[in-house]
Amino acid sequence: MSDLTARFRKLWDEIAPIGRDAGSGGYLRYALTEPELLLRGWFRDQAEQRGMPIIEDGNGNLFAWWGDPDAGDAVLTGSHFDSVPHGGAYDGPLGIVSAFLAVDELRESGVTPARPLAVGAFVEEEGARFGVPCLGSRLLTGALPAERAAVLRDADGVSFAEALGHAPAGARPELWGRFRSFVELHVEQGRALADTVAPVAVASAIWPHGRWRFDFRGEGNHAGTTRMADRRDPMLTYAFTVLAANKEARLRGAYATVGRVSVEPNATNAIPSRVTGWLDARAAEPEILTGLVEAVHDKAVERARRDGTAVTLTEESATPLVAFDGGLADRLAALLDAPVLPTGAGHDAGVLAGHLPTAMLFVRNPTGVSHSPAESATDADCAAGVAALARVLAELTC
Ligand code: HGY
Ligand code: MN
Ligand code: MN
Ligand code: MN
């Protein structure tokens, strides 16, 4: 085992148990809940051990600095700690652990960056607790108003402001303006690298994607005494819409799933009065995505007429096509001799890319699976990711 692989494993073992669900083997690291707060404490310890002062942006994002935080012209790297329910170990934390190890690599090789280097931990990237993905980076850059974020509530009715302990600060242009570039290392969410000899790839783009909430309303009634002809069952319209999303996505070479549903009153012996389903849809081109969502909505409305139910559609978040800085991507791909890949997964890098030159590095995932306990990466490939990130940071901070 190489020295760097051993160092990766040592640091990884410090966080691996935090938030892991013994039953599923997946992670329950919702933003600002106990496991994620423990990881933020770990972040502070790592920064302190390296003499890196921390700046908090007032939105829940943390930035540890090597160099003068006020000097500007800094290179930012990092990712997020939070997970989807029963998510994988690597989605997010790999980018933060790799960032601290890359700082160590640079220091050990005697590199003294000509400009500051910051390690960032963004809050609520998955949107698994408060419903809006990349909440922290959207707040930092002003893509989401602080007053809208403050009142977002989790399943227990706790608001983001309450979880944060104060109202979010909102846009901090004087802070993100200190960054000249951002590089996020992330486990690959797919199998493009799995069958290649390359442990690391450079990202070219993030597909347009978004989340839409479908509310289906019908008439709650007794499951055993209501004649079938008299039923106005929203579960029927919901089920049909899920099938329509799958069909319309396949027709367009796009992606769509309804991964989250809530039912009222949610009783076996009661016809639902309301069913809510959240659609996640993604496509290579904005027009394809728009067409997909419109087609699914049209099918849902048509079916609702037949079922005597009502359907409303609400866009909860949308991310346009993110084309990463082409010059930077090509420069890093040449530096690392790495392939360049698009991705359908959203990232804080996708938000920052609208404000500063941004790049992503992907680390091979042999299963290609993500947002699941089956997400994987080998220690050797993670060490290769750290080495690649260190080379990139040396290149960008010189
Ligand atoms: O949902 C996504 O694409 C990202 O993993 N948060
Ligand atoms: Mn994710
Ligand atoms: Mn992620
Ligand atoms: Mn009864």
Image: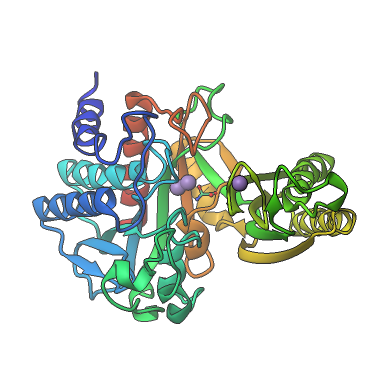
Asked if 139 appears above or below 344 in the picture, the reply is below
Image-based side of 298 in relation to 360, left or right: right
Residue shown at 33%/79% (left/top)? 167
Where residue 364 sits in the image (x, y, percent)? Answer: 47, 30
Which coloring applies here?
Answer: rainbow
Counting labels gives 0
Q: Is residue 344 visible?
A: no
Quadrant of image for the N terminus: top left
Asked if 199 appears above or below 343 in the picture, the reply is above
Image-based side of 260 in relation to 282, left or right: left
Q: Quadrant of residue 33?
A: bottom left
Image-based side of 397 in relation to 259, left or right: left
Quadrant of image for the C terminus: bottom left
Q: Is residue 356 visible?
A: yes
Where residue 153 sits in the image (x, y, percent)? Answer: 43, 67
Which of the two residues, 371 or 298, is positioned nearer the viewer here? Answer: 298
Which of the two residues, 97 or 263, is positioned nearer the viewer here? Answer: 263
Where residue 338 sits in the image (x, y, percent)? Answer: 50, 35
Q: Quadrant of residue 193?
A: top right
Asked if 334 appears above or below 215 in the picture, the reply is above
Asked if 354 appears above or below 14 in the picture, the reply is below
Q: Quadrant of residue 24?
A: top left
Where residue 27 sits in the image (x, y, percent)? Answer: 36, 39
